């Protein structure tokens, strides 16, 4: 057996990788210019089936079939097609007693590589986010490890094929009601990048 | 849910780790480096560990020994991790069943990978999920939870729970940061121990099933 120090260097380094990764992921949450993720696509291209309201287009929404009977996660993308900043200010769902966006940094809260408290940017837990800003021409994408809608207090089992209602409240565009499919645990996620 | 900025014990190792990483782990910052230019959440995860490694996961500078701890399995029986998994390729993860995002994503990714692994690698591969929230994650809860992932696999996942101090000791033995906030703030690393009872690699948050399929045959040991 190799010797085991209380804090093996390799492990610390690896754990840190995780930390750095988490910081990166958190930073990755900040809205990107629309189209940036899709390479050559012109800015402000959204899928044809996007739900549009005001200046916003929401697409790629899904709920992952939960393994827990109590909690689940939903994901979606929202693009701001207008020239004014928007904020996602609230959520609710008919499938759960509470819904909230987690693990998105607070407005302006870009995680730094050297935050005063590293734990602040390194969380892999559950940090409720405040209102999330989506600037003009930008897309906010929630995806595993990069922010999610926490559905807590599930009212019943969520099984693939079901549709779940998700009500998003935006500062300017108002409320958008989505019917969101439940995707099986092992199934690929519908892309939320505006591609296929 | 609670916030998990906590003081004290984690800060020390994080500070030390941050220093270390600056020199040793350029690759691990990939996720951070990528976001400026790509924002490509559909692409490969932050899995590049630099030019020196052949793995997609994170390679340890010094292989880590398979840890020793005894917890309780989903049948309520003692499970001596070191003895029961000895000489078996083993994926070890610490999480909790109410975790909606990282934990189920991790377990589903592992299950997907196992379905694609060569039969000789998958044959005795053991996945062990240790709860960081033993107050809620009883044996029955764990059993139901894991059955969502492993129902069609030849080797069922092992779910372990126990008294909180024992669960914390297991994390310490494995060398991962000990979870806080009722288990909600926890390590995202999936440790992989080979047949020779050492871990050469771990998979960080955001890994893919392709990463696992690529790495396990290489890191399974002699």
Image (cartoon, coloured by chain):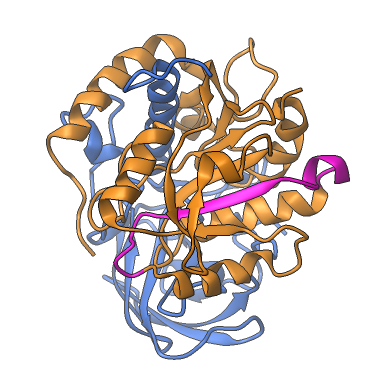
- Image position of B105 with respect to A96: above or below: above
Q: Which residues are magenta?
A: B117-136
Give coordinates of residue B163: x percent, y percent: 30, 57
Residue found at x 70% / y 70%: B151
Give coordinates of residue A43: x percent, y percent: 56, 48
Q: Is residue A20 visible?
A: yes
Give coordinates of residue B189: x percent, y percent: 48, 39
Chain letter for the blue part: A
Chain letter for the orange part: B
Closer-to-camera residue (B60/B82): B82
Give coordinates of residue B11: x percent, y percent: 19, 30
Please give left or right for residue B189 compared with residue B57 in the image. Answer: left
Residue found at x 34% / y 36%: B172
Q: Is residue A194 magenta?
A: no
Q: Quadrant of the N terminus of chain B?
A: bottom left
Q: Is residue A45 visible?
A: no
- Image position of B38 with respect to B159: above or below: above
Closer-to-camera residue (B114/A87): B114
- Image position of A82 with respect to A14: above or below: below
Please give left or right for residue A131 compared with residue A125 in the image. Answer: left
Q: Quadrant of the C terminus of chain B?
A: top right
- Image position of A152 with respect to A125: above or below: below
């Amino acid at each position: 057996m190799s010797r085991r120090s209380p804090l093996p260097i390799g492990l610390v380094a690896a754990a840190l990788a995780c930390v750095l990764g988490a910081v990166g992921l958190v930073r990755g949450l900040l809205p990107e210019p629309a189209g940036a993720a899709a390479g050559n696509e012109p800015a402000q291209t959204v899928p044809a089936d996007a739900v549009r309201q005001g200046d916003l287009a929401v697409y790629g929404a899904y709920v992952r079939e939960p393994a827990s009977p109590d909690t689940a996660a939903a994901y979606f993308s929202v693009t701001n097609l207008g020239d004014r900043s928007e904020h996602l200010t609230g959520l609710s769902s008919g499938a759960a007693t509470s819904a909230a966006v987690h693990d998105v940094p607070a407005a302006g809260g870009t995680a730094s590589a050297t935050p005063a408290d590293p734990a602040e940017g390194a969380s892999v837990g559950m940090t409720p986010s405040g209102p999330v800003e989506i600037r003009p021409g930008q897309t906010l994408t929630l995806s595993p490890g990069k922010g999610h809608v926490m559905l807590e207090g599930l009212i019943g089992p969520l099984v693939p094929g079901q549709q779940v209602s998700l009500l998003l409240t935006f500062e300017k565009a108002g409320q958008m009601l989505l019917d969101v499919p439940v995707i099986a645990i092992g199934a690929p996620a519908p892309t939320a990048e505006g591609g296929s | 849910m609670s916030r998990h900025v906590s003081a004290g014990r984690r800060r020390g190792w994080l500070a030390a780790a941050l220093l270390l990483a600056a020199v040793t782990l350029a690759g691990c910052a990939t996720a951070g480096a990528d976001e400026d230019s790509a924002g490509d959440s559909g692409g490969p995860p932050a899995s590049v560990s630099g030019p020196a490694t052949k793995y997609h996961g994170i390679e340890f500078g010094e292989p880590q020994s398979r840890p020793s701890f005894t917890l309780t399995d989903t049948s309520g029986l003692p499970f001596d991790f070191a003895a029961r998994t000895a000489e078996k390729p083993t994926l070890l993860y610490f999480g909790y069943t109410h975790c909606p995002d990282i934990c189920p994503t991790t377990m589903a990714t592992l299950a997907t990978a196992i379905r694609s692994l060569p039969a000789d690698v998958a044959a005795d591969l053991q996945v062990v999920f240790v709860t960081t929230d033993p107050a809620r994650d009883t044996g029955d809860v764990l059993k139901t939870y894991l059955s969502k992932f492993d129902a069609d696999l030849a080797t069922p996942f092992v779910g372990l729970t126990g008294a909180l101090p024992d669960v914390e000791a297991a994390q310490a033995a494995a060398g991962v940061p000990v979870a806080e906030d009722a288990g909600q703030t926890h390590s995202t690393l999936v440790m992989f121990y080979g047949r020779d009872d050492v871990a050469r690699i771990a998979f960080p948050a955001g890994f893919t099933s392709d990463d696992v399929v690529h790495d396990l045959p290489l890191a399974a040991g002699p």
